[in-house]
Image (tube, grey):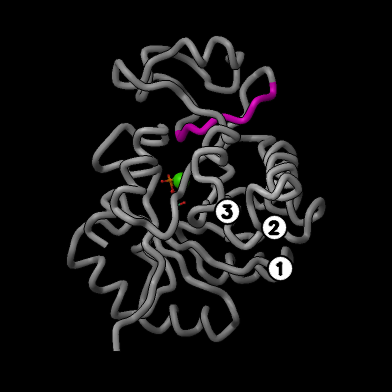
């Protein structure tokens, strides 16, 4: 029997096009993903933007702290000459409930705005709660989401410690653990699933790693190359 797992594009289709851009997300959709993972930061004027790094230098023609810049200033920047930094709302409008959206709260103070944007999207019937999962390494951001909207599905990210992630997951009624691929074994997938959580693993890029994750029976695989899933 073939194992069913969610195919999730990491930062869109990071392996193919500039990460966290509308174009990268559109590329992932062309590969018929079940979901898209994106990162969110809050800029100096309060808007939520889709971007991975805390500084602008690696990805854009700007420099310095992302959070110190106004939205207007960020919008003038270019990623790989052509692309713009999108807002969280633009990504929600693009996808419009057509697949799962994994919003990673990467920057500080991102929970409050994200909750509001999700609430508005659900209220406007553009999205349903079951198609959005908010994840973070930052426990206090997830606590904020849990406190303000119990309908939002939560995933606990971990790089290093599955037990700590499981302990915390209980406190915010999370539905999933999102472990780094290096942490994943057949036995801990089984254990986490028996405790009632899904396991969405990141970032599986090599064919052999992807095959191993499938064999372990994970629920979702997040990859820079969603076409390999
Ligand atoms: O959400 C999974 C993964 O994206 C977490 O790490 O550094 O790629 O945001 P990073
Ligand atoms: Ca991420």
* Ligand 1 within 8 Å, label 3 CB: yes
The quadrant of the picture occupied by the N terminus is bottom left
Q: Count residues near mark 1 (Cα–Cα under 10 Å), then give few for <14, some for 14-19, many for 20+.
A: some
Mark before the other along the chain sequence, 2 or 3: 3
Front residue of 124 and 163? 124
Q: Secondary structure at mark 2?
A: loop
Q: Which residue is mark 2?
A: 152
Residue displayed at 45% across by 63% down: 179
Tag nearer the camera, 2 or 1: 2
Whole-angstrom CA distance, mark 2 to mark 3, is 10 Å
Q: Which residues, given as a range, are shown in magenta? A: 46-52
Whole-angstrom CA distance, mark 1 to mark 3, is 12 Å
Residue displayed at 58% across by 50% down: 136
Residue displayed at 57% across by 75% down: 197
Front residue of 192 and 73? 73
User: Residue 170: x, y in percent?
Assistant: 69, 71
Q: Which residue is mark 1?
A: 173
Hey, which quadrant is residue 111 in on the image? top right
Q: Secondary structure at mark 3?
A: strand
Hey, which quadrant is residue 108 in on the image? top right
Disc count in the image? 3
Outermost residue, front direction?
125
Q: Which mark is residue 135?
A: 3
User: Residue 4: x, y in percent?
Assistant: 37, 77
Outermost residue, right direction?
148
For this view, does 196 lie left or right of residue 182? right
Q: Which mark is residue 227?
A: none
For this view, does 209 lie left or right of residue 219? left
The quadrant of the picture occupied by the C terminus is bottom left
Q: Count residues near mark 3 (Cα–Cα under 10 Å), then give few for <14, some for 14-19, many for 20+.
A: many
Q: Secondary structure at mark 1?
A: loop
């Amino acid at each position: 029997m073939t194992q069913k797992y969610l195919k999730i594009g990491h930062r869109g289709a990071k392996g193919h096009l500039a990460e966290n851009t509308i174009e990268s997300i559109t590329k992932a959709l062309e590969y018929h993903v079940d979901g898209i993972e994106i990162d969110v930061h809050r800029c100096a004027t309060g808007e939520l933007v889709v971007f991975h790094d805390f500084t602008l230098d690696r990805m854009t023609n700007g420099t310095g702290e992302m959070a110190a810049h106004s939205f207007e200033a960020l919008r003038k920047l270019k990623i790989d000459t052509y692309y713009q930094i999108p807002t969280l709302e633009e990504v929600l409008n693009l996808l419009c409930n057509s697949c799962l959206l994994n919003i990673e709260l990467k920057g500080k103070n991102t929970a409050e705005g994200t909750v509001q944007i999700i609430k508005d999207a659900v209220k406007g019937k553009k999205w349903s709660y079951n198609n959005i999962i908010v994840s973070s390494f930052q426990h206090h951001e997830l606590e904020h989401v849990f406190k303000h909207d119990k309908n939002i599905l939560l995933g606990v990210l971990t790089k290093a410690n599955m037990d700590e992630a499981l302990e915390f997951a209980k406190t915010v009624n999370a539905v999933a653990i999102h472990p780094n691929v290096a942490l994943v074994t057949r036995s801990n997938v089984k254990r986490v699933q028996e405790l009632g959580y899904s396991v969405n693993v990141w970032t599986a890029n090599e064919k052999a790693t992807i095959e191993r994750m499938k064999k372990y029976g994970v629920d979702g695989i997040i990859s820079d190359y969603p076409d390999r899933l």
